[in-house]
Image: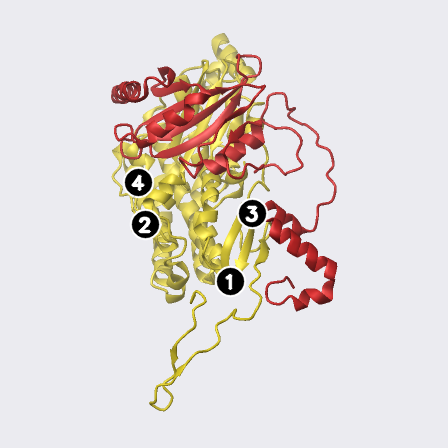
Chain colours: A yellow, B red
């Protein structure tokens, strides 16, 4: 951009320097701006989002980010079902890492009930969360790389994601909509031999990551498209309520797994990668580095997986074992009560946040003492990050919208709820 | 758990010292500090929370509302979740809002991130935020009648059919609050397709 100034170009024809003043673009052309509508169904916006950009040439001078095309009323629906029945709805928030949503919801209700789940359940939650986190980052980076032309990277990353989803499927029975969390623990134990198969899968994932690293990190085209685009300083990022990889890319070392550990995260050793500049390239690097950290956490958790129950033994919170249901009157009554009326947390309201793949995933739940939430609200990181998108793309070129949007990693289900 | 409780009581003491006059009520609920404030004192309290070095609540984590219907005197309650990245503590700030005049001051000037959250609360509950630069619906469409997360809105509520919208470009120009663009579009249309190409670089194809 020459800001409308006339260029002084030294042509240097035949060794004689000649100063010419070419006519600047826009000298006598109309300088009317153009409004371009991007989406809501656009091949490069993986998710239904509409961006109305006002362009001067290729430069974005104003933009309106329009969300809500995937609004399903998660919060309204949650008020009509009991606490465990919300679980399938949470799957459909961030549907790339549904296990994290499950556990976020469970932890909130457990805080409301003031109970702590057994150690083994906590470790299983950590393992599943971290596998989901890697899958989420793979999706984000793979899709973004594809949009910038690196199709091979996308295929490698999808292949790596398949390996991880196979692991998730093995434990939960589903690849995406896992519904694996339960208030008070998890649905089922890990399958026998899971640790060995996880090792094999992690090895494959790491091999893919090495390949992708070679293809992307020092790739000139990729760097040109990512560096110095959509820069946010640490203060700006905090002011915009950004969390997760976006905040860390701006240089703020804040990770809820370290800051306020939950589910025994304090027992694992891992680093929190941070960026320096806060541009799209830093966001890419932070996500890339986080995948290795997540795999490390998984390996530690699998190596030290404690024995014991996977749900709390309180019959008012978790279903009692089947042989008790069929062989004792207490067990039968407890089972009936829990299935018919659900978990009944005491009155009160609680906000609990965990580190989702995109940032702080918080649930605010108000209980009126009955089996159904009086009010359930999810603090969806994607939604809040989309609020910062206008500022990120102002002044950038129209071609910068796609990588910026890719690095925000908006997941429609989570953003619009 | 003991550690958390100590931190919470330390935060509660600091809050009472720094902004004791504004607080209507302050309790520790399930290990979390929850303070209540009247709408008039909201901006002052949140400004202190953000700017006081001993509190250092620099990040607005969440903003939502609860509809209490007949359960409470004031129908609505807006809940702010503040987080301090340096001190690593949290506080919930609750403010009651009446049904007759559902209006409280906006905090977009304090935290730019509040913009989308306040728009969501306006959309879902119909609570207006005075001083918000662009208070529009965000998840529902402009023509939506009512506010869906209010308790008196039915779960399977039906909406009236909406008439066909104005041409997209004109509509987006209006949405962007740019009357000049609306007139440009109207002018281009009245001239017809031929003159559109004559407008030059800036016009649509």
The local crowd at label 1, few if under 14, some if 14 to 19, many if 20 or more residues have their Cα within 10 Å, is some
C-alpha separation, residue under disc 1 versus residue under disc 2: 33 Å
Circle 1 is placed at which residue position?
Answer: A58
Q: Same subunit under labels 1 and 4? A: yes
Q: Earlier in the sequence, mark 2 or mark 4?
A: 2
Q: Earlier in the sequence, mark 1 or mark 4?
A: 1
Circle 4 is placed at which residue position?
Answer: A297
SS at mark 4? helix
Residue B70 in sight in this render: yes
Q: Earlier in the sequence, mark 1 or mark 2?
A: 1
Residue A186 in sight in this render: no
Which label belongs to residue A289?
A: 2
C-alpha separation, residue under disc 4 versus residue under disc 3: 34 Å
Q: Are marks 4 and 3 in contact (CB under 8 Å)?
A: no
Q: Same subunit under labels 3 and 1? A: yes
Q: Chain of mark 4?
A: A
A403, above or below A355, in the image = below
C-alpha separation, residue under disc 1 versus residue under disc 4: 44 Å
Q: Chain of mark 1?
A: A
* Residue at 68% from the left image edge and 64% from the top image edge: B196
Q: Judge depth for marks 3 and 2 and give the one in front.
A: 3
The local crowd at label 3, few if under 14, some if 14 to 19, many if 20 or more residues have their Cα within 10 Å, is many
Image quadrant where residue B113 sits: top left
Q: Judge depth for marks 1 and 2 and give the one in front.
A: 1
């Amino acid at each position: 951009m020459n800001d409308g100034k006339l260029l002084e170009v030294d042509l240097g024809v035949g060794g004689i320097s000649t100063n010419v003043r070419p006519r600047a673009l826009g000298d006598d052309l109309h300088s009317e701006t153009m409004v371009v509508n991007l989406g809501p169904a656009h091949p490069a916006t993986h998710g239904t989002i509409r961006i109305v950009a006002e362009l001067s040439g290729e430069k974005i001078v104003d933009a309106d980010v329009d969300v809500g095309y995937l609004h399903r009323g998660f919060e309204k629906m949650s008020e009509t079902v009991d606490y465990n029945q919300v679980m399938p709805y949470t799957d459909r928030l961030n549907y790339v890492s549904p296990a994290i949503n499950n556990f976020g919801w469970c932890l909130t209700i457990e805080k409301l009930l003031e109970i702590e789940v057994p150690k083994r359940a906590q470790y299983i939650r950590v393992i599943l969360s971290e596998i989901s986190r890697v899958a989420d980052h793979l999706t984000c980076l793979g899709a973004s790389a594809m949009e910038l032309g690196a199709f091979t990277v996308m295929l490698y990353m999808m292949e790596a994601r398949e390996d991880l989803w196979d692991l998730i499927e093995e434990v939960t029975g589903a690849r995406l909509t896992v519904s694996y969390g339960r208030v008070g623990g998890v649905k089922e134990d890990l399958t026998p031999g899971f640790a060995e198969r996880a090792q094999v899968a992690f090895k494959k994932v790491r091999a893919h990551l090495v390949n992708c690293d070679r293809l992307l990190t020092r790739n000139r085209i990729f760097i040109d498209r990512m560096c110095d685009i959509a820069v946010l300083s640490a203060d700006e990022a905090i002011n915009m309520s950004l969390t997760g990889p976006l905040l860390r890319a701006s240089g703020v070392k804040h990770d809820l797994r370290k800051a306020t550990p939950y589910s025994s995260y304090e027992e694992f050793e891992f680093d929190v990668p941070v960026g320096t500049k806060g541009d799209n390239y830093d966001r890419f690097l932070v996500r890339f580095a986080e995948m290795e950290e997540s795999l490390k956490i998984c390996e530690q958790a699998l190596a030290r997986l404690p024995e014991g129950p996977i749900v709390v033994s309180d019959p008012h919170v978790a279903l009692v074992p089947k042989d008790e249901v069929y062989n004792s009157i207490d067990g039968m009554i407890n089972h009936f009560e829990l299935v018919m009326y659900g978990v009944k947390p005491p009155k009160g309201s609680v906000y609990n946040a965990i580190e989702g793949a995109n940032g702080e995933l918080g649930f605010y739940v108000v209980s009126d003492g009955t089996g159904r939430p009086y009010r359930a609200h999810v603090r969806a990181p994607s939604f809040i990050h989309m609020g910062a998108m206008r500022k990120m793309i102002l002044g950038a070129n129209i071609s910068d919208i796609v990588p910026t949007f890719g690095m925000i990693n908006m997941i429609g289900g989570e953003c619009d709820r | 758990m003991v550690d958390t409780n100590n931190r919470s009581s330390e935060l509660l003491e600091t809050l009472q010292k720094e902004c004791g006059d504004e607080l209507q009520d302050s309790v520790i609920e399930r290990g979390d500090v929850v303070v209540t404030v009247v709408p008039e004192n909201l901006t002052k309290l949140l400004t202190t929370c953000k700017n006081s070095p001993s509190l250092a609540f620099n990040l607005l984590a969440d903003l939502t509302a609860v509809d209490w219907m007949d359960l409470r005197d004031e129908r609505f309650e807006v809940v702010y979740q503040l987080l301090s990245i340096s001190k690593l503590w949290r506080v919930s700030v609750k403010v009651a809002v009446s049904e007759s005049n559902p209006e409280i001051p906006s905090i977009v000037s304090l935290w730019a991130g509040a913009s989308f959250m306040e728009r969501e609360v306006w959309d879902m509950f119909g609570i207006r935020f005075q001083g918000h630069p662009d208070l529009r619906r965000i998840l529902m469409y402009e023509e939506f009648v009512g506010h869906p997360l209010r308790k008196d809105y039915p779960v399977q509520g039906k909406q009236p059919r909406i008439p066909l919208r104005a041409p997209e470009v004109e509509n987006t120009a209006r949405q962007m609050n740019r009357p000049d663009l609306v007139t440009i579009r109207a002018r281009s249309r009245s001239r017809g397709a031929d003159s559109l190409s004559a407008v030059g670089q800036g016009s649509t194809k």
